[in-house]
Each structure stands twice: as structure tokens, then as C-alpha cells.
Image (cartoon, coloured by chain):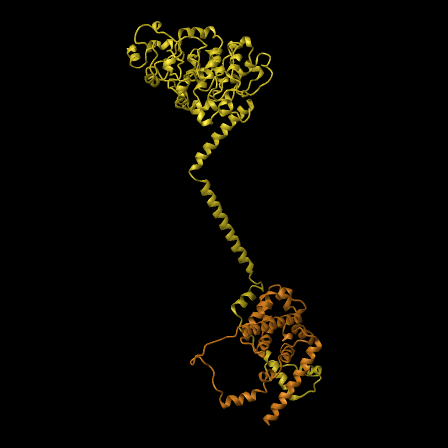
Amino acid sequence: MTGRETPPDAVLHLLDEAGIAEDPALVRAVKTIGALGAGPAPEVTAELAQLMAAGGKAPPARRNKRRITFIGGALAVSMGVGMSGVAAGTFHLTDGLTEAVESIARFTIRDSADRAQPLPGAMAGPDDGGRGVVTPAEIPAPSHATAVPAPSRSVTEPSTVPSPSVADPSRPAPSVAVGRAADAPPSAAGARPSAVEAGPSAAPATRRPVHTAPRAPGDTVQRADPPPAVVPPAAVPARQAPPVADPVAGPAAAPHAVPRAAASPVAPAGSAPAPGRERRSAPAPHSPAPESRAPESRAPESPAPGSHTPGAPVPGSGKAPHSPASGNGKADKSGHEVRQMRQPGQEQSGGLDAGSQGAGASPAENTPAAPGRAWLLAPAGDPGSIPSAPEDPDRPASGDPGAGASTSMPAPTAETRGAEEQAPAPAPENPEAEEQAPVPAPAPAAGPAGASGLR
Amino acid sequence: MVSTLPDDALSRAQTGEPAALSLIYQSLSPAVLGYFVGRGSADPEALTQEVFLAVFSRLESVTGGLPGLRTFTFSVAHARLVDEVRKRTRAPVLVGYEVDGDPRTADSAEAVALRDLDLGGAGGLLEQLSPDQREVILLRIVAELPIDQVAEILGKSAGSVKQLQRRGLLRLKELVHLDESEAQ
């Protein structure tokens, strides 16, 4: 029948199993059907041949999927890394790093400042960092108050300030000095007056924040009774912080500044303006009183003599016997605006006169020329002929409680007294103000007349 | 067929020996092809290739020696055939009529005579059986599988398979005698 001979027994067995009698025609038909599976093997396709050659191992289809997944993941990761790198690798990165370093350094300084001075609360302004904490060890005895250098500010030249000052030598440029001084950390010197104010008994007690409730001017006057050296502000607002006490001027400088600031209801601690604004408009704290301003307290950026500042000391001397200690030369009828217009270099010599100028009187009108430079203002003649402003410490400062506080200053020390006697009439420092405001009658204007006097 | 395969053919094939695989293919593929042909598959050779692709891919899971391999192979063949039938049912081929491409021709007298003669052949006889009878007869004669394995492949009981086998053989007997009587 077919190539493959079906065993006869198999067909017969099949017929027997089915219970069918053997029939030659049926046997022949069964053998014909059985011949269907006796043909040649069909040709092997390529896929089957590959499978057979591979030993029956089917190609792992999931491997390709895994590979695709892996490649996709790697691509996504690389794209993410690239985008991150581009985002982080901008040219602002270096600036950002620099700013970060600066901010970290600044925070470090601020942190030390905060540790030294407990934060008085929400009333604390950024500019009152210079005076807040008094350590008992730093509090001198009342009897030695005159020998204790007054707190200094960063406005003053660090090299000329031997006292532990807020002035940070690492502080940047003088042009920013005022603002920096506002943020300067508190120092023992800055806090010293507060402790002295508390009295000898309270001095070693605690370190307490400077800021308390604003005080009335009268209170300040009462507090000014203690020794001359220090009647520091209990709450010194930023713009009314006491002036830098010069080591040379010593305690004499502090009394002028402190009472005024302490009794300043104009800008109490809680009403301190924004830091940035204060930095621009805080002339008073850095300006010692005209009577007590020492030449060392002048900042290096003080205008040079001969430039438009008749009362400026001679540069390079570093110590002018008759400090200019002029008032706010830029003060006009409204002292507030003048303060905002004041520049850092001018703020140093602003002194407490700024407060007195706030009363509406221009410095040229109210402030007599400093004796050391009075001859500059005089049209002719010797300085002795120039009438100077009265040394009356009770000189009223209308409108400015700080000025009133300054009237409660104790008597200056011998050192400063001599200077005051020699410089009874501090001259305005700002030439522009001098030009604009007429010089009081006793002291002729420092404009052309002064120039002519120079000549 | 079964006797032509050595006893260690399966074990060697499971280890991945290509020669053993080729030997298995040469031994079983004709029966598989005959099975598809007898079942009237449209492309029996392609189905045969698919069957062995599946068998060789799962060769490691085959147990029972050569009979087990044979049963497994025809089980896959039966599954493939069922898939093809279902596929054909779901998606019949619809081709637009083209005169030039119409291969249909009218049968000549000789073709009709030969076809009548072929009625006594395998194809003519199987076509006159029921599907179940045909399936059992093919698996029993072409695949040379025992009743229990055929029952396993078809998902029927052994008694059912025996009954189908018997009725199928009786039907063949009638057809053969009918053809012989008509021929005479």
C-alpha cells in the first residue's frame, strides 16, 4: 500500500479491539489511511532548523524586552543627569557659591552676635546689635567709668578703636560701614553702658538686652545722673544708637550719645525702621557729640580738608586736637530727610547734632564752628574772635528728645573739657549744607567767606 | 516509526543534541503531516513546523519516554489544528472575484472517473466519516496511539474513543463494500 508497511497484526488488533470481523476490503482501506503518515518528512524551515541547531533552546524573547527596558532606563537616566548638569552648571553657579559662602559667614557672625546678645524680641531691630548684652566681667566699676572706653561702632576706623568693638575688621568697605555697623554683632563695649546704667549693684548681675520699653525723655534725664561716663540707652533704636565712643575721647563721648538715644521716643526700639533703610538713614549713632567728638573717631572716609568740608580734620594726622565734630551738615528744616540723605562718610560726623537739627534748625545756624576750624569760617581775624556756641549742656534741642538727653550729660572729663573749651562751636561738616544754610551771625558762612579767610 | 527511534533519543534531545532532535523530527513529522492532511488542513506542512517548534521548545518538560513524546507531539498537533479551524471560522478568507485568477475549472470526465475510483482511497473514505470518527481513526491508525492517549488528546473517555473507533471502522467497511458493489 504505502512505503511504510503497517504491521498486519496492528490492523488486525485494531479490528479485534473494535469487535469487527476481519474483512480484506476493510483491511485494505485501513492500510490506505495508515499510509498518510508514511510519507517523507517535510522540509525544515529556517526557524525550526535554527531551533534544532541551538539544541532546542528557544531564543529568549524576554531578553530582548529586558534589553529594551534597560536601554530605555539608561537613556532616561542619562537625560535626567544631563538636564541636572545643565541646570547646575550654569554660569551663575560661581556667583551662587560666592553668595553662599558670604551668607554662611554672615550667619556665623550673626549667630555669635545673637549668642552674645539675647534677642529682645520682635522689637529688636537689626541695627541694635551693637548694644545689648553686658557681661559682668566687662562692666567696670562706676568709679572707673571714666577710664572705660566707650562703645565704639564699626563706623570708626577699626585701627583707631582699641576697645572691643562691634567694628569688625573684616567688615567690608567703608561705604557700607554704616549699614554694616548696624548689623554688627554686639560687643562688650557696646553693652557696657547698659550695665553701668543699671548701677554698680546691678552691673554684675546679668546680661540683659538693651531693648526695653521706650523711655520717656525725663527718665533719661534722671538716669543721666550717674557718673559721667555712661548713661547708656536702655533701648537704643538703630538710628538713634549711641555714637561711637572713642577710646581717646573715652567716657566723655558716651554720655552725649547715650541719653539721647535712651530718651528718644521718636524711634523706639519697636518702631525701628527696616534694616535696609536704617543703614541708609542712621547718621546719629555714628556721630558723636560735637563737644565730645574725638579726632580718632573720624572714619577714614571723612572728607578731606580743603574739599568741601571746612571742619574736617587734616588727613593723615589721625588725631586732630580739635575734632570737627560737626553736626549734620545736610540738615535742613526737617532733620528726618537729612538723615536719609546722609552718606556714610558724613554720618560719622553727624553726631548728636543731627538730633538737634531735627528741631528745624540747620547746623550752620545752630551749631557753632569747631574751634579748630573756626578760623576757616571766619572771614578774618584770629579764632578767638569768633563767637562760639555756648557750651551749655542744657542747650535745648527742641523736638528731639535725644537732644534733650544730651543736655543731661554729665560734665565731661578733663580731657574732653579742654577740647570742648577749645572747640566750643563745632562747625558743620557738610559743605553743601553750609552753602545752603546761612552761617549764624557770629560765625560767618563757610562758603566764599571762609574760603577767602583761608586765603 | 516508533521503533526507528532509539531509546535514548529523547534523553539526548533533552540535553540539546541536534542529531537527536533531527532524528525525532524525521520520525514523527510524517505522521504529524499525515494527520494534518487527513484532517484537511489548509497548510499541513506549516502546521507541522509549528508543532515541532513547540515540541522542541518544551522538550525538557516531556516525560514518559518515546510514547510520552509521541503523545505530546500529537497533542500539540491537535491543538494547532483546532486553532486553525477556529481561525478559519472567525476570519474566512474573502477574495474578490477575478476571472484570470479564478483557478476553478470544471472537472473532466477522466477526473470524475478517477475521483470515483479514489473514493476507495484514504481521503474519500475519511471525508465520509464524522469528525470525531475521523479524529479517532487518524489518531489510532496514523499516529498509532493507544486508546487512552487518544482519549487524553481528545479530552474524551476511553470508552467514548472505543465507540467512535468502532463506528468509524464500521462506516469504512460499509463504504468499501459500497464502492466494491458500485464498481462491480
Nearest the eye: A139 or B28: A139
Specify the quadrant that holds the N terminus of chain A: bottom right
Snapshot quadrant of residue B73? bottom right
> Is A160 on the left-hand or right-hand side of A438?
right
Q: Give x and y (percent) for residue A344.
A: 41, 21
Nearest the eye: A270 or A370: A270
Q: Give x and y (percent) for residue A20.
A: 70, 85
- The chain painted orange is B
**In the image as oriented, which residue stretches furthest toward the bottom?**
B184
Q: Is residue A170 visible?
A: no
Vertical arrangement, residue A410 with respect to residue B34, above or below: above
Q: How many marks?
A: 0
Vertical arrangement, residue B92 with respect to residue A399, above or below: below
Q: Give x and y (percent) for residue B124.
A: 58, 84
Q: Residue at x 33, y 5 (%)?
A: A382
Nearest the eye: A58 or A135: A135
